[in-house]
Image: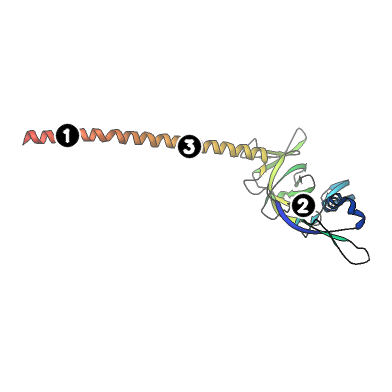
Amino acid sequence: MEGLRVADANLVMYLHPSKSRNVSQSILRELGSLLFKLVLLLSLKFNFSYNSKLLLLFNETFDGVLLAYDVNILDKQAKILSGVHPYFGLRLKANLLLFSPKPDMLLEGKIVKLSQESIHVIVLGFSSAIITAENIRGEFKYRTKDTEELFASKSHKRHVIKVGTMIRFLVKSFDEEILHIIGSLISAHTGSIRWLDRHLEEDSEFDRSSMKSRDREWLGDKTVDEGATPMSYDNHIKMSKKRRITE
């Protein structure tokens, strides 16, 4: 999946002297505060509600949502800052895993709600996405089967999209404030991940078998050509003998 990247960052963290007894734990706690923020109730305008959940936030400094980190403390001695509260600063080097989706990137997510007008998806368990009817290609036809709503491909009967399906879709836009994505299933390489991967494997096997058959044909033609050389040589010898006899 696209939209994930690893970044190296040089940071300076300022800690209160009261935290000097366990600096490593204090640093991890401060970095952890960049990961999550407690939200009691967030109601999105796309019929989704998250009650008492930890919500990841977009960080403008890192240009993405911080998902994970690995940090090394570079300073063995901290520098004390002058002021009312004498904080001390530590230089850190961190490896950061960021989620930063951009337009035309391929993302993967799980369908949590589906109707004739739209498909709702959760990406990485925290970011919501919506794919509206105008962004679903004409190959998919909406229908109900045993009261279950789904989109089925008219070209491939086994290509079905329903609640619980993991899909691959293109990003049209990304709202950094609420981490909401507008997606698209217009492109031919979007849809059910399971079907797409299986179809890709079948195409690869077909390509390999086609190459083998072409190789066999090429070897067969080469064998015939090589066998024709001695025959031509024999005919040349016989013709030479006939000419000598005639002379």
Q: In the rendered view, tell whether residue 176 sits above or below residue 220.
A: below
Task: Work out whether mark 1 precedes mark 3 in sequence or the reverse, and give the earlier one.
Answer: 3
Camera-near label (1 vs 3) is 1
What residue appears at the point 17 percent right and 34 percent down from the top-left corner? 237
Q: Is residue 78 left or right of residue 210?
A: right
Image quarter hosting the C terminus: top left
- Which x, y percent locates residue 127? 78, 49
Given the current orientation, which residue lies at the most extreme left position? 247
Task: Work out whether mark 2 precedes mark 1 in sequence or the reverse, and give the earlier one.
Answer: 2
Instruction: Compute the Cα span from label 3 to label 2.
Output: 52 Å
Camera-near label (2 vs 1) is 2
Give, as a three-letter code, the residue at label 2: Asn
Q: Which mark is residue 194?
A: none
**Can residue 62 be seen by looking at this rendering?**
no
Given the current orientation, which residue lies at the most extreme bottom position? 83
Instruction: Compute the Cα span from label 2 to label 1.
Output: 84 Å
Give, as a three-letter code, the residue at label 1: Ile
Q: Quadrant of residue 223?
A: top left
Q: In the rendered view, tell whether residue 17 sits above or below residue 227.
A: below
**Can residue 109 be seen by looking at this rendering?**
yes
Q: Which residue is mark 3?
A: 210
Q: Is residue 194 left or right of residue 229?
A: right
Q: Secondary structure at mark 2?
A: strand
Front residue of 150 and 171: 171
Give, as a three-letter code, the residue at label 3: Ser
- Which x, y percent locates residue 79? 84, 62
Q: Which residue is mark 1?
A: 237
Q: Which residue is mark 2?
A: 72
